[in-house]
Image (spheres, rainbow, N blue to C red):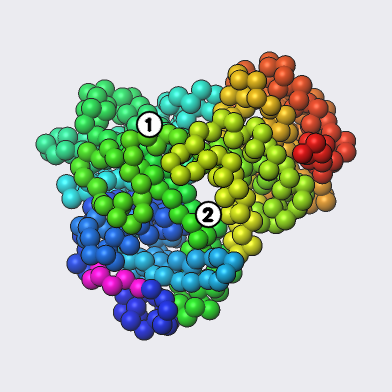
């Protein structure tokens, strides 16, 4: 059965479908970046609110700014912006169709349709899921990268920007000129302090062309921090076939684990949906929640995915079945990561490590090591290196973190230990590969990439450990290095 509004009532019994009148929904949110994570997470929370009869004036208008987003737009418009969510749990699978998204704007050069929609006073939140590497952050110090060609372009062409942030600035300029209040800007990406970083990018870009507008945005708009969590694999032929097994013809279904968490700072200048009615947590202290998740889960993904790529382990659950990778995860998390994580209400760091190990080990989730290892230049600098710096400052062990960085360097050389090639998997792949190849003979060549490591090459404690591990990986193999690290568990 092809998925669309007309066929919802004909889908097989057992599939949960919208019980609300989608034609009566009105938009309150523009969401930029309609990937799988958004549709399994934020859009699901809103759908559940609608199911309970609440907040029907907060529906989502989808948007994208990349050429590839036009393909997603075609798929979703063909099925009335409905999405089949398939929950993957070792005990069984289930399916649900969500309908909180009611439109998808044209993807076009200059982003005129997106700017026009965001300038509409009905829009009170503009949210983004654009990946950790999409915020124009300088990797070395976390500042706004005003010298990036895209930021230069948007500053020089404020009426026809190429980025989401340029479009946001343009829409806020129109609202200010029309005497309208601003919308809240909400990041839904895995960045610690994601609201603060989004503010830095939007205000920083506005300041390049219009300092008065930048001051107005900074004073009147809001940028709530949040922590988002749900493991959501990429969609391919297997996922589409799984939807068909449920009796649904969906060209863009989403599979996900049986776990969601959303912790949000309650700072919305133009109102918000009642997400707390359906399980979201509102708090003015998001930091400890996001630090726990980013340091244990997101950094943990990098620990095991880089090793898995080198050893030709295709999935994250497969990595957890590999005894040495699993033991590496357990030891580094408990001895080198958890000491830097504060407990949150109802969860101690050690218990969270055990929870993440169970989630990573779920064999029903076919999450590839390649997907998880993607964009290591953002994920290592955002998730792993801050823990390393804390360990160096406090005296907590950092040997496993040095090994993790050595594994990333080995992966970026571009071959697995079985001789197969690793396809480019990072925006900076070419320069990473040059450094990785040089590091095979001189390990410090990797650490001398100051855009990622800053001054860490001069830290003897870290540099010595890194050199030792990378030499061992190249001379004896990844499994030998993992075993050497884990042998005193």
Residue at the spot x=26%, y=58% of the render?
Answer: 59
Could you say where residue 295 lies in the image, as x and y percent from the top left?
Answer: 55, 37
Could you say where residue 470 lies in the image, as x and y percent from the top left?
Answer: 79, 32
Q: Kindly give the residue lying farthest to the left in the view shown.
A: 179
Name which quarter of the figure residue 54 lies in: bottom left
Does 331 sit left or right of 151 as displayed?
A: right
Task: Give the quadrant of the C terminus.
Answer: top right
Task: Please state which of residues 333 and 463 is positioned toward the viewer in this rendering.
Answer: 333
Task: Give the quadrant of the N terminus.
Answer: bottom left
What residue range appears in magenta? 17-22
Question: Which mark sits nearer the N-terminus, 1 or 2?
Answer: 1
Could you say where residue 320 lies in the image, as x and y percent from the top left?
Answer: 69, 53
Does 464 sit left or right of 175 as displayed?
A: right
Can you tell which of label 1 and label 2 is closer to the viewer?
2
Does 269 sit left or right of 105 as displayed?
A: left
Q: Is residue 77 visible?
A: no
Is 19 magenta? The answer is yes
Residue, disc 1: 196
Q: Kindly give the residue lying farthest to the right in the view shown.
A: 476
Considering the numbered disc 2 on the image, is that residue within a helix, a strand or a loop? loop
Residue at the spot x=51%, y=22% of the render?
Answer: 141
Residue at the spot x=50%, y=61% of the render?
Answer: 258
Residue, disc 2: 231
How far is the residue under mark 1 from the one under mark 2? 24 Å
Is 48 magenta? The answer is no
Could you say where residue 263 lies in the image, as x and y percent from the top left?
Answer: 39, 44
């Amino acid at each position: 059965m092809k998925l669309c509004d007309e066929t919802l009532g004909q889908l097989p019994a057992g599939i949960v479908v919208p019980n609300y009148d989608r034609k009566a929904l009105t938009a309150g949110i523009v969401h930029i970046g309609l990937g799988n994570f958004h549709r399994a997470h934020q859009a699901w929370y809103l759908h559940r609110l609608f199911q309970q009869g609440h907040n029907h004036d907060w529906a989502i208008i989808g948007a994208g700014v990349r050429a590839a987003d036009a393909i997603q737009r075609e798929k979703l418009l063909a099925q009335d912006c409905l999405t089949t969510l398939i929950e993957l749990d070792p005990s069984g699978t289930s399916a649900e169709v969500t309908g909180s998204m009611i439109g998808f704007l044209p993807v076009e050069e200059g982003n005129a349709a997106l700017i026009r929609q965001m300038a509409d006073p009905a829009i009170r939140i503009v949210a983004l899921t654009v990946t950790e590497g999409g915020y124009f952050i300088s990797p070395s110090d976390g500042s706004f990268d005003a010298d990036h060609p895209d930021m230069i372009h948007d500053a020089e062409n404020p009426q026809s920007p190429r980025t989401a942030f340029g479009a946001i600035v343009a829409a806020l300029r129109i609202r200010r000129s029309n005497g309208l209040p601003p919308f809240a800007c909400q990041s839904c990406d895995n960045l610690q302090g994601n609201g603060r970083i989004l503010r830095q990018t939007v205000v920083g870009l506005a300041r390049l062309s219009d300092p008065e507008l930048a001051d107005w945005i900074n004073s009147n708009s809001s940028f709530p921090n949040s922590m988002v969590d749900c493991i959501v694999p990429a969609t391919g032929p297997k996922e589409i076939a799984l939807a068909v097994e449920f009796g649904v013809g969906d060209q863009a279904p989403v599979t996900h684990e049986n776990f969601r968490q959303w912790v949000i700072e309650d700072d919305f200048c133009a109102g918000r949906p009642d997400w707390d009615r359906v399980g979201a947590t509102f708090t003015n202290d998001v930091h400890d929640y996001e630090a726990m998740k980013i340091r244990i889960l997101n950094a943990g993904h990098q620990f095991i995915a880089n090793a898995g790529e080198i050893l030709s382990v295709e999935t994250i659950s497969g990595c957890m079945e590999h005894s040495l990778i699993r033991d590496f995860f357990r030891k580094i998390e408990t001895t080198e990561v958890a000491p830097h994580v504060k407990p949150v209400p109802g969860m101690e760091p050690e218990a969270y490590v055990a929870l993440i190990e169970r989630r990573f080990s779920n064999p029903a989730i076919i999450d590839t090591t390649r997907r998880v290892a993607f964009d290591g230049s953002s994920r290592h600098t955002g998730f792993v290196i801050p823990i390393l710096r804390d360990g160096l400052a406090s005296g907590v062990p950092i040997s496993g973190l040095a090994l993790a960085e050595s594994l990333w360097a080995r992966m970026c050389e571009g071959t697995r230990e079985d001789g197969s090639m690793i396809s480019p998997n990072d925006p900076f792949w070419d320069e990473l590969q040059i450094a990785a190849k040089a590091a095979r003979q001189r390990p410090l060549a990797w650490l001398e990439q100051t855009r990622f490591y800053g001054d860490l090459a001069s830290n003897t404690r870290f540099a010595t450990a890194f050199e030792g591990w990378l030499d061992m990986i190249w001379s004896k193999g990844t499994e030998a290095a993992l075993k050497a690290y884990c042998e005193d568990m």
